[in-house]
Image (spheres, grey):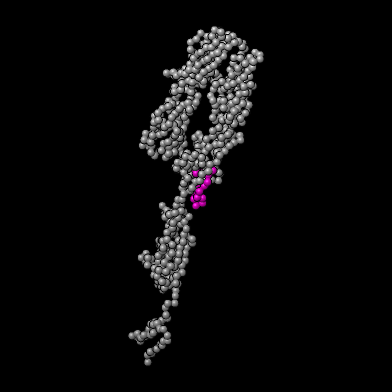
Amino acid sequence: MTNQVLLHFLVPLFCGAISQPIRYSIPEELAKGSLVGNLAQDLGLGVQELPARNLRVSAEDYFSISAETGDLLVSGRIDREKICGKKSECVLEFESVTENPMNIFHVIVAIQDINDNAPHFFGKNIELEICESALPGVKFPLDSARDADVGSNSLKMYTLSPNSHFSLSTKESPDGDKYPELLLEKLLDREHQSSHHLILTAIDGGDPPLSSTTQIWIKVTDANDNAPVFSQDVYKASLRENMPQGTFVLQVTATDQDENVNGEITYAFLNGPASTNLVFSLNPTTGAITTNGTLDFEEKSRYMLGVEARDGGVHTAHCNVQIEILDENDNVPEVTFMSFSNQVPEDSVLGTVIALIKVRDKDSGQNGLVTCHIQEELPFKLQPTSKNYYKLVIDRALNREQTSEYNVTITATDGGKPSLSSKTRVTVHITDVNDNAPVFHQASYVVHVAENNPPGASIAQVSASDPDLGSNGQVSYSIIASDLEPRALLSFVSVNQDSGVVFAQRAFDHEQLRSFQLTLQARDQGSPALSANVSMRVLVGDLNDNAPRVLYPTLEPDGSALFDMVPRAAEFEVCFLLDP
């Protein structure tokens, strides 16, 4: 499993997520421990419920929950520019999870910009060469400043130090950035003044405003009276991510009506982020732009490049190049276990949740649309819940005695063409409950015992088995009924509770006792215990343990004869006395 979060729980039903997210708004760069809001109260939880509900959030890098009050607190640095860049609206979306029962809530925290970034120029100096023949009204785009803040705190305007030859206006590029444009107000005279030094100031709209400056050094040159002209002000191209280095993007083209060296044009990127030069290359002779590194849609989906065309003299022209990066299905779906219980009782009810799963795909659109499934033969199923979440629930009755564990493979597949998928495997162990009573190996027992047996001798053995585990399957034996007198039973037989061996407590006498009936019980040690009964018929066999008896006559008072049986070991005589 990849980066799994294992929280052991087992609930009969998953309660789902509330439909509307909880929303807060805070300024960036709050100190650690600052209060965002009372999340527990906004979720309808009382303080006394917090220990049992185990309220927590998934955005642990930025926020934490007070276990005592349920307050949502800042736990790390929240830098709006690092999180959202130049986006006008910046929000952190994350989930809050409670247990007992389990609920998932969506939380949105809007991050408000503060004016913590001053505008800055990429270079300390701007150097221009302007021909003395340039006519008033000619415009010269200057390098723009960048401000990481947005909205009213972003770059607002530029100002120029007072001078008699130039004025300044603030323009806006197609992507919304403001750049300064220098306007020639008065003819230049190289012989009178061959250079000019100006100070350009960039000011943002914060309160109080922040600013930075750069130096403009202007060299006045002799006349080259035609400047290059681009065929387009803005060039646009679309390019799929992961294209190999050297892939052609587009070609910019500028022309100059001058001849010879004054009409020879070279191309270069305007000063911009260093990463731009790493990603793209510009042929200085042809104006062809090619890739110079790996493009990643998930890292950056749009580039705005400034290109300068310079003739062999001092004239320049500028254009913008807008490159859109198109998404490829180059990221496999990721499966994360938010909670997982790998010990499941076999008597769990259908619908019991054993895992909460989150899926994620860094791609966008159809390429980032993920579906999950598991093997069909398992007694579980995946149910989608809220956005990007599934729960793994019991779908059929479990029987540990048939199957004690299941290997579950979760396959996540995105909607790309061709699609990408990943597999995550977990093992679910089925725990035993006392759901099987002992079973005797025979339906009934008939035991033959010869009389005059020695006391304490084993006369039979009963045996029962129980497929449950541990104490649930541990069997003990007892005699629970007999057709003998209750007090006589104890003196006749007993049974060993562990082995099921039946012992004669005394010698049996066939002439007194021909047979007797017992009912034995096998009982497991579960809670509650389960039992089974079986009958046993004990037949006492006759032995030749009585010698013959002889009848002797005796005279009665009336003179008649009565014969008594008297035992004799050998010969005997019979005498009859007769009346004369």
Percent x, y for residue 553? 38, 85
Question: Image height check: is 408 above or below 214?
Answer: below
> What residue is at 44 percent from the left and 18 percent from the top?
209
Left or right? Give the position of 196 relative to 553: right
Percent x, y for residue 94? 46, 32
> What residue is at 54 percent from the left and 34 percent from the top?
361
Percent x, y for residue 308? 59, 19
Percent x, y for residue 390? 50, 38
> Which residue in the rendered view is the most extreme toward the left?
557
Residue 202 in view (yes/no): no
**Which stretch did the figure color magenta?**
394-409
Question: Image height check: is 464 above or below 579?
Answer: above
> What residue is at 56 percent from the left and 20 percent from the top?
270
Q: Nearer the viewer, residue 277 or 195?
A: 195
> Which residue in the rendered view is the most extreme toward the right?
259
Secondary structure character of the magenta stretch overall:
loop
Residue 268 in view (yes/no): yes
Q: In which quarter of the image is residue 34?
A: top left
Question: Image height check: is 51 above or below 442?
Answer: above
Left or right? Give the position of 288 relative to 274: right
Q: Nearer the viewer, residue 126 or 573?
A: 126
Q: Which of 210 and 104 is in front in this view?
A: 210
> Which residue in the rendered view is the most extreme toward the bottom?
580
The C terminus lies in quadrant: bottom left
